[in-house]
Image: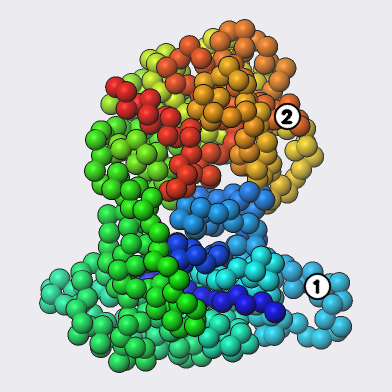
Amino acid sequence: MSTTKYVFVTGGVTSSLGKGIISASLAKLLQARGYSVTIQKLDPYINVDPGTLNPYEHGECYVTEDGAETDLDLGHYERFINIPTSQANNVTTGRIYQTVINKERHGDYLGKTVQVIPHITDEIKRNIQLLGKKHNYDVVITEIGGTVGDIESLPYIEAVRQLKWELGLQNSLFIHLTLVPYLSASGELKTKPTQHSVKLMLENGIQPDVLVLRTEHPLNNDIKKKVALFCNVDIESVIQSIDVSTIYEVPLLMKEEKLDLTVLRKLNLPENEEPKLEKWKQFINNFKNPKKEITVGLIGKYVELPDSYKSIIESMVHAGSMNQCKVNIKSIHSERISNDTVAECLKGMQGIIVAPGFGQRGIEGKIIAVNYVRENNIPFLGICLGMQCAVIEYARNVLGLDDADSAEMSRTTKNPVIDLMEEQKGVTEKGGTMRLGAYPCKINKGSKVFEIYNKENIHERHRHRYEFNNIYLEKFEKSGMKSAGINPDTGLVEIMEIPEHRWFIGVQFHPEYKSTVVNPHPLFVNFVKEICKD
């Protein structure tokens, strides 16, 4: 019989309060006390996954080792607890309904009327318990997306209400995250929104066990007492979550508030040893006390929404801390870059990252930016489409292939230096059909990248349809742009670099998906280290 305990995290009053960060922080603290923990996200939208969503809609699409396209919160989970997530860690309404409808078509329900209760809720419960049963975790933390009261979230709320009684009262608990706003006109913190949010939970049959209150100002004991009284919880279960300068301070803040101890007590679990957070504290100390400061340009097509490139930005935070350097990221829209504006757009940038993306919009701006940094010996990191732009630029301006392009951007180019992968030809569906997940790469021993990784065989995560066209590889290598890494199974080029350049590396994969607080990714660390030499 499974001994897994379940923690359900819900949100009220408003969205974007940080349920994912609270979930990840609690997981970090429990993990540091010796418990095996994982986190999953239940997303109430009807898309099967976020893979087909515009980054403006939902932020970054995060990719797991097993090739699942998931919510960006899974990136936070991995960065905090330093263990990989999987398809089972992200469940959407679309996937739930798709599974139930497929079962109905298959005849699994033996002619019964298929309904939200019990069929949809049963499928939700099955997915929630899948992780605990399969891997026998001590604790599974389940974050429910959206805000209590949203019509889309109701099946999830009902499913976890049922689960609490099925699992037993000491085997599950509810953490409800709400907002305590400050009214500057009256100089008061107001608890009424929290009271109403908990009332909504009660109407749905759930009594929160722990309340986490987001606030800009410290909560005094009187406010905590008031919330405890009106929301039916003990005062030790009213936790303050005050605004901090970086999300990575939240675990330490939650430790001060004894969130982990409260949860362990309510789940009837031993406290074990005090959390070992020395590396975490060192990371924050380096972050807050940098010895240098640099500015790096991030060139992309969705820069108006920082969450579109969340993993890249966080990877640079990790790399900055490792180098005791403050990294200022300046987002630059690629559509604003032209031959006339490039010098002004990139003025003051000590390094450039060209971000991933899809489609033709803004592509020429990226190519012009690559040309500028290559010719001016400015450190450059190209990720996925960023690498492909570097290849196109080099083909046009060094190899003399004026019409060189990607087959994604131009069907008529006579020099498709980037071409559709063989297994992608004939694929018409968009969702979940790209080259996704971790693949091997063998690094050339004489390359700069080998010095950075300090090993020959690596695994990195991918999300793309187009690849370097090997027909042109010899021309590139003869003229100075070298292949530094190859997939040993397919021969596909994974890494291109220019050895004569100060620091010029393009990678077909997404290194940002594997960077964590405890293990910053070596490419980002070395990129920042090189810039810090200035």
Ranked by sequence position, the earlier of labels 1 and 2 is 1
- Which of these two is toward me, 115 or 281? 281
How crowded pointer 2 is (Cα within 10 Å; few <14, some 14-19, many 20+) is rated as: some
As displayed, is residue 438 above or below residue 56?
above
- Residue 2 position within the rendered picture, expressed as x and y whole percent measured from the top left: 66, 77
Name the kind of residue labelled 1 in the image. Lys
As displayed, is residue 178 above or below residue 253?
below
Q: Is residue 340 visible?
A: yes
- Which of these two is toward me, 166 or 359? 166
Please tell me in which quadrant of the rendered image residue 332 appears: top left
- Residue 261 position within the rendered picture, expressed as x and y whole percent measured from the top left: 39, 75
Query: Farthest residue in the left direction?
Result: 186
Q: Which mark is residue 488?
A: 2
Query: Farthest residue in the front direction?
Result: 273
- The answer to whether residue 488 is left or right of residue 74 is right
Disc 2 secondary structure class: loop
- Residue 300 position within the rendered picture, expressed as x and y whole percent measured from the top left: 45, 37
Name the kind of residue labelled 2 in the image. Pro
Taking the spot 62% from the left edge, 35% from the top edge, the residue there is 458
Disc 1 secondary structure class: helix
- Which of these two is toward me, 92 or 320? 320
- Residue 239 position within the rendered picture, expressed as x and y whole percent measured from the top left: 32, 76
- The answer to whether residue 176 is left or right of residue 326 is right
Residue wearing tag 1: 103
Taking the spot 65% from the left edge, 69% from the top edge, the residue there is 136
What is the spatial separation of the Cα atoms under label 1 and label 2, in whole angstroms? Answer: 40 Å
Taking the spot 29% from the left edge, 32% from the top edge, the residue there is 294
